[in-house]
Every structure is written in C-alpha cells, then in structure tokens.
Image: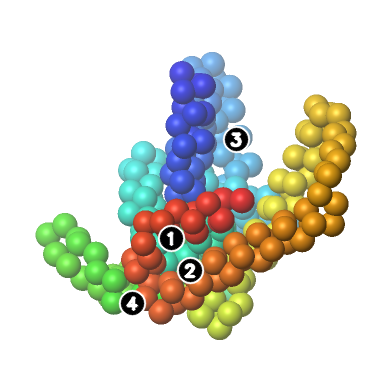
C-alpha cells in the first residue's frame, strides 16, 4: 500500500504533491494522537507542540522551525478538508498563470508572511496580551490565500463558479475573502485572521513583483534547490562511480550542444511572452507540454 501511495504521489503535479504532504502529516499526527491516548503516553500533544507556531517570541526562539512546519499541520478533519479543497481548486487556477516553481514559493511565502503577521499581532496589540504564551497557529490557510490573491492579481477577470452564487470574478472573490478576515480581526480566531492577511500580502507581492520582472519566490526556491542538490550529490557520490565519456566530435559537439540549448531557451522565451500577452489559456497543447517539460528540469 505504501509503494502504491508513493507511486501516486510521484505522478501528481505540484498541487497534488502539496495536498499529499498535508494529508500525510495529518494522518501521522492523528495516529500518534490515537495511540498516545490508548497508552496514556501524551505523545500526540508533544508532537503537535513541536510543530505548531507559538505566539510567544520566547517560545519561537526555542522552536524557530515552527514558522515553517505549522503551514503543513492540521488537527481537525474539517479544517484540513476545506483547506485542501481550496488548495486543489485555486492551485489549479494558479498554475495556469504561473510556473510550478512559483507555486512552491508562493505557498511557502504565504505561510511565512502569515506566521510573522500572527506572531507580531500577539506581541503588538494589547488585546492579545492575556493570550501570549497560550496561543498557537496551525494550518495552510495563509498559504492558500496567498495562492488565491496572486491568481487574482495576475488575472482579475478570471471567472469561477461558486455553489449557490454562480459565476464571479476571481478578483471579487479574493477581495471578499480578505474583507471577511479584516472584519473578524477581533473575533475568536483573530490571530488566524491576521495570518490570513499576511498570506494575502505575500500573494499580492508575488504577482505584483513578477509583473515588474522580479521573482521574489526565488528567495524560497534557491535554498530548496541548494538543499536538494546537496542531498542528490551526497547520494550519487555514495552510490555511483565516476564515469568518463569521450566524444569523437570534439569542439563541434560542444557547439551543437550550445546551439540546441540556445534554441530551446529562445522557444521558452517565446512561450512566456505569449502567456504575458494572452494568458496561459492562449497556449496550444504542444506549447503547454513544452513549458511543463522545461519547468520540470
């Protein structure tokens, strides 16, 4: 069963992979909680405590990784259900306008901005003073809202169909969602709504800066690339022997390789320019496939 799940995970696009990761963490934490109750161990609470984001700066300094782990952690079934439905729906819309790498960067930046907004709100506003040290943040809501807002900024006229409401503009949906979070800043989930707004700001910044030609998701993707390449190099150095290949083509082989590389880059540039003019939907199936293959390398 594990091999089957792993195989399905590998076949998913980046949105599906993030959903799998969230669900897997939820299941593991839930199972630990069940067995800890049965054996009176209390391990479930300990695991959650070391993954959730604390509002206390003192606790955060002792567990800085929670600024990242909290955005993949859910305890309640309905919480993860709604977040994953929203991530599936709006994640698919997002990758129509952006690349797969942009999705990774926007999700994580949304979570980071949301986490910072949550912690700052509890340490700045007197309203939260009695609750600092006993309040914690979990869930992917800030990351999901970053995905929604970034998509709305890139293509505000894109229409989505909502149950019982009908067709609405994506920009309208994003504005209403952000407005609801603003109106609920003094409610029972005030800290969570500050996190939502932090995620919304991250999504807006990603799309706005990309329109200016600046990719702020690279601040997230470059460290991830470095860590990934480090482990790949370590794995290959243990498993593989050096291979030496000789080419009879000499310099001509290098010239042919560079020519092919430049031609491929020129083709990708044309596809990206076409997306800027007419959006992702204007691409042919062949162009979509070509762009997907290039982004996967």
Which percent across, then down, holds residue 206? 53, 72
Name the element at disc 1.
Answer: helix
Which percent across, then down, holds residue 201? 50, 74
Q: Is residue 251 shown left or right of residue 33?
A: right
Crowdedness near tag 4: few (<14), some (14–19) or many (≥20) residues, C-alpha within 10 Å:
some
Q: Is residue 120 shown left or right of residue 143?
A: right
Q: Tell me, for residue 287, which label it has, or none.
A: 1
Residue identifier under label 2 = 271
N-terminal label among 3 and 1: 3
Q: Give the residue furthest to the bottom.
A: 212
Residue at the image point whose x is 50% and y is 59% from the top: 291
In-front residue for pair 260/284: 260
N-terminal label among 4 and 2: 4
Q: In this picture, is 282 found above or below 15?
A: below
Marks 4 and 1, how far apart in space?
24 Å
N-terminal label among 4 and 3: 3
Name the element at disc 2.
Answer: helix
Name the element at disc 4.
Answer: loop
Marks 4 and 2, how far apart in space?
21 Å
Marks 2 and 3, how far apart in space?
46 Å
Residue at the image point whose x is 76% and y is 40% from the top: 231
Crowdedness near tag 2: few (<14), some (14–19) or many (≥20) residues, C-alpha within 10 Å:
some
Residue identifier under label 4 = 156
Looking at the rendered image, the disc whose residue lies closer to the viewer, 4 or 1, is 1
Crowdedness near tag 1: few (<14), some (14–19) or many (≥20) residues, C-alpha within 10 Å:
some
Residue at the image point whose x is 47% and y is 65% from the top: 98
Looking at the rendered image, the disc whose residue lies closer to the viewer, 3 or 1, is 1
Looking at the rendered image, the disc whose residue lies closer to the viewer, 4 or 2, is 2
Residue identifier under label 3 = 47
N-terminal label among 4 and 1: 4
Label 2–label 3 contact, CB within 8 A: no
């Amino acid at each position: 069963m594990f091999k089957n799940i792993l195989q399905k995970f590998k076949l998913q696009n980046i949105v599906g992979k993030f959903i799998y990761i969230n669900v897997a963490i939820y299941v593991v934490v839930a199972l630990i909680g069940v067995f800890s109750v049965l054996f009176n161990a209390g391990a479930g609470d300990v695991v959650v405590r070391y993954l959730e984001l604390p509002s206390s700066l003192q606790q955060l300094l002792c567990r800085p990784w929670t600024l990242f782990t909290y955005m993949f952690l859910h305890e309640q079934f309905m919480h993860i259900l709604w977040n994953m439905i929203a991530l599936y729906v709006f994640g698919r819309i997002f990758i129509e306008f952006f690349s797969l790498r942009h999705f990774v960067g926007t999700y994580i930046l949304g979570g980071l901005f949301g986490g910072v907004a949550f912690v700052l709100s509890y340490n700045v506003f007197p309203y939260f003073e009695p609750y600092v040290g006993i309040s914690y943040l979990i869930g992917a809501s800030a990351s999901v809202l970053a995905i929604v807002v970034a998509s709305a900024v890139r293509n505000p006229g894109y229409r989505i169909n909502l149950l019982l409401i009908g067709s609405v503009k994506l920009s309208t949906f994003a504005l209403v969602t952000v407005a609801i979070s603003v109106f609920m800043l003094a409610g029972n989930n005030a800290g969570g709504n500050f996190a939502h707004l932090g995620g919304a700001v991250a999504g807006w910044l990603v799309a706005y800066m990309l329109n200016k030609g600046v990719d702020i998701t690279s601040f997230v993707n470059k460290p991830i690339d470095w860590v990934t390449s480090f482990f790949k190099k370590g794995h290959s150095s243990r498993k593989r022997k050096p291979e030496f290949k000789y080419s009879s083509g000499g310099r001509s082989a290098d010239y042919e390789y560079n020519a092919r590389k430049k031609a491929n880059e020129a083709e990708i540039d044309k596809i990206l320019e076409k997306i800027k003019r007419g959006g992702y939907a204007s691409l042919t199936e062949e162009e979509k496939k070509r762009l997907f293959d290039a982004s996967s390398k």
